[in-house]
Amino acid sequence: MESLNRFDIAAYGDVLMVVVEGDLLPPDPAVVVMPLLRDYPAVSRLNPVIRVGEAELILATRLIAAVRRARLRRVGIAVDSGDEITRAVDVLMGGV
């Protein structure tokens, strides 16, 4: 099982995703992620732009999903955008 932490960027095929699941949860074969997409309709605070290398990708917050860890490969980290990602989850869940 791939060791993935919160805010890691992982590749699922050719789609990049950010791990949003907390690190304190017990190990599970699946992990909660949000895709990073180039052309996604952005809504303020719900879909922050995340820089990955030279690319600016949009966090597709509403496409939150659980993916099997075995299908993911860590390619980076978005800890510098952690506050924006957490705020996007809060907006999704509570509308604040």
Image: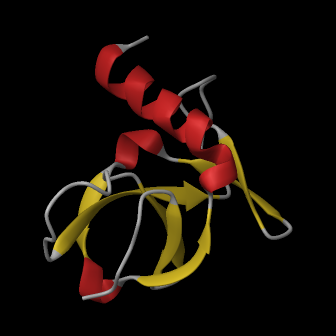
Residue 10: % across, % down: 49, 75
Residue 74: % across, % down: 50, 81
The extreme right residue here reads: 54
- Measuring 19% from the left and 56% from the top, which residue is drawn there? 25
Along the horizontal axis of the image, is 66 left or right of 58? left
Of 41 and 68, which appears nearest the observer?
68
- Residue 83: image quadrant is top right
- Residue 66: image quadrant is bottom left
Of 35 and 69, which appears nearest the observer?
69
Q: Is residue 51 above or below residue 87?
A: below
Number of marks: 0
- Measuring 13% from the left and 71% from the top, which residue is drawn there? 28
- Residue 19: image quadrant is bottom left
For the rendered model, the colour scheme is: secondary structure
Of 2 and 33, which appears nearest the observer?
2
- Measuring 16% from the left and 71% from the top, which residue is drawn there? 27
Residue 47: % across, % down: 58, 36
Residue 26: % across, % down: 13, 63
Of 21 and 50, which appears nearest the observer?
21
Question: Which corner quadrant holds the C terminus?
Answer: top left
The extreme front residue here reads: 24
Question: Which corner quadrant holds the N terminus?
Answer: bottom left
